[in-house]
Amino acid sequence: MQHPDFLIDSQDKSLFIHNVNIAPLSKGITDDDLLYNASIAIENGDIVWLGKGKPPEQYSSFEQIDGSNQWLLPAFIDCHTHLVFAGSRAHEFEMRLTGKSYEEIANAGGGIVSTVRATREASEQELYELTTKRAFKWLAQGVATIEIKSGYGLDIESELKMLRVARRIGRDNAIDVATTFLGAHALPPEYKENPDAYIDLVCEEMLPAAAQEELVDAVDVFCESIGFDLAQTKRVLSKAKSLNLEVKAHVEQLSNLGGSELAAKLNALSVDHVEYLDEAGVKALALSGTVATLLPGAFYFLKETQKPPVQLLRQYNIPMAIATDFNPGSSPIASVQLMLNMACTFFALTPEEALLGVTKHAAQALGKEHSIGTIEVGKRAKLALWDIEHPRHLCYEFGISQPELMIV
Ligand code: NIG
Ligand code: FE
């Protein structure tokens, strides 16, 4: 498939963008943090210089790009998605509109397991084509890095199939993909009577096989009443650690099982959802430096009323990431900009916090803060140019702007 023509691949190129306003997002979006009327030099995909005023002579031979006085931001990072799946759950949406809850639908054999049926049936090529189409929608909105989880296969072959598709998407396209193994997403029907035997399978066969094929950057578990309990979560994440893999977890989404504390003790990169997180959990995150990833799309789509403890997260200096959680059940919403807006309107984040949530802190949630997420010398040049008045407009407006240009 052809890449959109607003994309510039900066590999093997020397680029110089002048007449541009830069929001590096290494700190925030106050006037002191922003560079007005600046320029930036890029060599072989790396940022080599940025600043205001007259640039060093050596960059005059670089290919020149006029930034048209627009705003350059780090390309967005969507650090939590379930982009690979087949089928739809529109009928469950209708059921929820007439009063059935997400848990009731899951307990009656629908929910995640119904997407598992459709995903198992789809061929690897079909899944690849479905996911490629989706990935292009992310690129078009200024996203250069996306995390993709497995978790709709729930048997060895189908989990490997999902992860191979995720890897291929990253290889074949201008978007970078971080893969996450989520074999412990739900209990497959064939293990209904014996959840621990399924965890044996995940730990002893699925995860080692996926790691062996180098398909796994991190390991996740759905720690919840309709997912897996603390002891099961601990087994999977500990196994991941023994294979030298990073860990993260879906925790405290519908209730508080103490998953955040457990994940923090295992030095998780992030804990995700966290609507029901309490102060003990927040303190544990502070000790381990774990990111709290907020998912306003799932909060909205499930009509949740419990909000994540943003004030406590601020008090303990926990970095907050924001992601779409794109999936067919709890967040079929493919828009990072809508997440920025919802993080502000629902969770009372400031536009500055929200923007850091899809750049710097999202990079941290993927363990990639040394190479992406901010505009600084030494980082990879993954950038988006926006025709906006000020960076805060990306949180304020929705459905208006798309990036004018992306450097990847
Ligand atoms: O992040 N919480 C668990 N997993 C997904 C939902 C998956 C689904 O419903 O298909 C989530 O919300
Ligand atoms: Fe999720």
Image (cartoon, grey):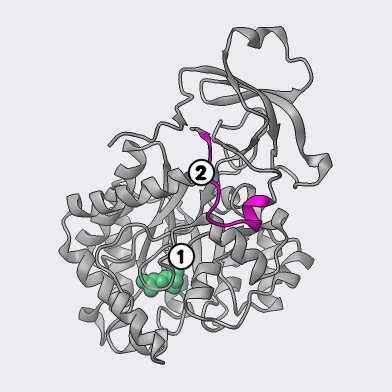
Local secondary structure at mark 2: loop
CB of residue at label 2: within 8 Å of ligand 2? no
Q: Residue lying farthest bottom?
A: 99
The magenta region covers 393-405
| Vertical arrangement, residue 280 with respect to residue 126, above or below | below
**Is 234 left or right of 154, judged from the image as shown?**
right
Q: Quadrant of residue 382?
A: top right
**Is 104 left or right of 359, judged from the image as shown?**
left
Mark 2, other Cα within 10 Å: few <14 / some 14–19 / many ≥20: many
Residue that numbered label 2 is attached to: 142
| Vertical arrangement, residue 219 with respect to residue 41, above or below | below
Q: Residue at x 67, y 79 (%)?
A: 278
Split into quadrants, the picture shows ligand 2 in the one at bottom left
Q: Residue at x 39, y 35 (%)?
A: 4
**Is 332 left or right of 206, judged from the image as shown?**
right
| Magenta highlight on residue 403 | yes
- Decide if residue 62 is in sight here: yes
Q: Position of residue 392 (x, y in %)?
A: 70, 51
Q: Position of residue 247 (x, y in %)?
A: 49, 59
Q: Residue lying farthest front?
A: 400
Residue that numbered label 1 is attached to: 237
Q: Position of residue 113 (x, y in %)?
A: 28, 76
Q: CA distance from mark 2 to mark 1?
A: 32 Å
